[in-house]
Image (cartoon, rainbow, N blue to C red):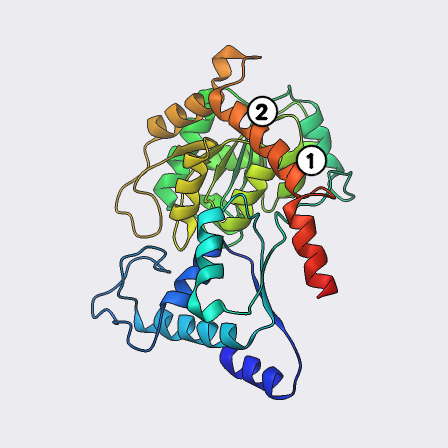
Amino acid sequence: MIAASAKALHNRGIPYCLFNSMSSTLVLQTLQVHADTQVSEEPIKEMLPFTDALPLSALYKALFLQIHEATLLTAGIIINTAYELERGIIDAIRSHPDMKGVPVYCIGPLMPVSKAETGHESIVKWLDGKKDKSVIYVAFGSIATPKPEDIRELWKALVKTEQPFLWALAKKEQHHLSEEILQKMSRQFEDDENSRCLILDWSPQKLILQHPATAVFISHCGWNSAIEGLATGVPVVAWPMSADQRPNAIELVRSGLGVLLEDTGYFSEKTVDAQDIYTALNEVADFARRGVLTKYQLAGLVWRNRLDDITSANGSAEKDFQHLVTG
């Protein structure tokens, strides 16, 4: 479908750009897939093979070939990233033989300027009632959800920290918590703004990450979440589930912004232990030493300032955007 649409546009003389909302690793990997790429006969546990370990599943080989074919005809590739963030991968994409004459625009992170949002007053009120760098924020995106036993272990770890926490947990998954917890959470939180825990079916992530009360982010490390953590300077406890999330998590660790929980995700047979989660949270945020920034929080400040510069009027993202719109 991707290749067919690309050909239709190309044959009609209509220029188009491909937009990649994931890390630039996806673009590079699609460029490396060709008709002779070996197909695995064994089940592949990862939903997407974001590693150098080919072969691919037949499904993803077909998908990547379509994207590769569309790339050959495009007027440019737009990526939600910053050149300085993925310099080596971007350079490899730009130097690939199939990319001759195809510009790559790095216009990220696509993070709006911090401002008040309507419709979330109760959440802001709850956050405003918490001390700076005290809240643990938990979110696994709109698709990923840990196993039921992992959800229960995560609850134990959060309670053990004795810190306020905000958890975006879909209603269909909340029954994995105990009846006692569910009864407690059934109260209207706007009438209990001093409560220590807040569980929501959905949360305004950018607003929460930009709030000064947020101390640490437990995340599956989808690309949007990873780059939003960098842009706001909030350190991460990485809990990848599938796809590109583990490589994204590893990059965050390499950037000094967090720690990685090992052997997590859809295909792991291990239950993530509450003590491991608790230890990771304390390593990243060190709640016992309130007022003293950890090395992860200091790295977060560096990255936040760096990405502010990148998206400023003279930054690389703004320059790439201007090249995109002016041709």
Q: From the viewer's perspective, is residue 296 above or below residue 140?
A: above
**Circle 2 residue:** 196
Alpha-carbon span between mark 2 and mark 1: 13 Å
Q: Nearer the viewer, residue 4 or 160?
A: 4
Side (left or right) of 144 relative to 55: right
On the question of residue 251 being in view, the answer is yes
Q: Position of residue 53 (x, y in %)?
A: 27, 58
Q: Which mark is residue 123?
A: 1
Instruction: Tell me the SS state at disc 1.
Output: helix
Residue 313 location in percent, x, y?
74, 44
**Residue at (32%, 32%) from the top-left corner?**
273
Q: Quadrant of the C terminus?
A: bottom right
Badges 2 and 1: C-beta atoms under 8 Å apart? no
Q: Can the viewer see residue 187?
A: no
Most distant residue in the left direction: 42
Q: Is residue 155 above or below residue 251?
A: above
Q: Give the residue displayed 47% in from the left and 18% down from the top.
A: 286
Percent from the top left, x then y, of residue 70?
A: 51, 75
Circle 2 crowding by C-alpha within 10 Å: few under 14, some 14–19, many from 20: some
Q: Which one is in front, 157 or 277?
A: 277
Disc 1 residue type (three-letter): Ile
The three-letter code of the residue at mark 2 reads Arg
Q: Which mark is residue 146?
A: none
Left or right of 143 in this view: 134 = right
Question: What crowding class fits label 1: few (fewer than 14 Cα within 10 Å), some (14-19), or many (20 or more)?
Answer: some
Circle 2 or circle 1, nearest the eye: 1
- Residue 310 placed where, x, y %? 64, 42
Q: Residue at x 37, y 66 (%)?
A: 32
Q: Mark 2 or 1 closer to N-term? A: 1
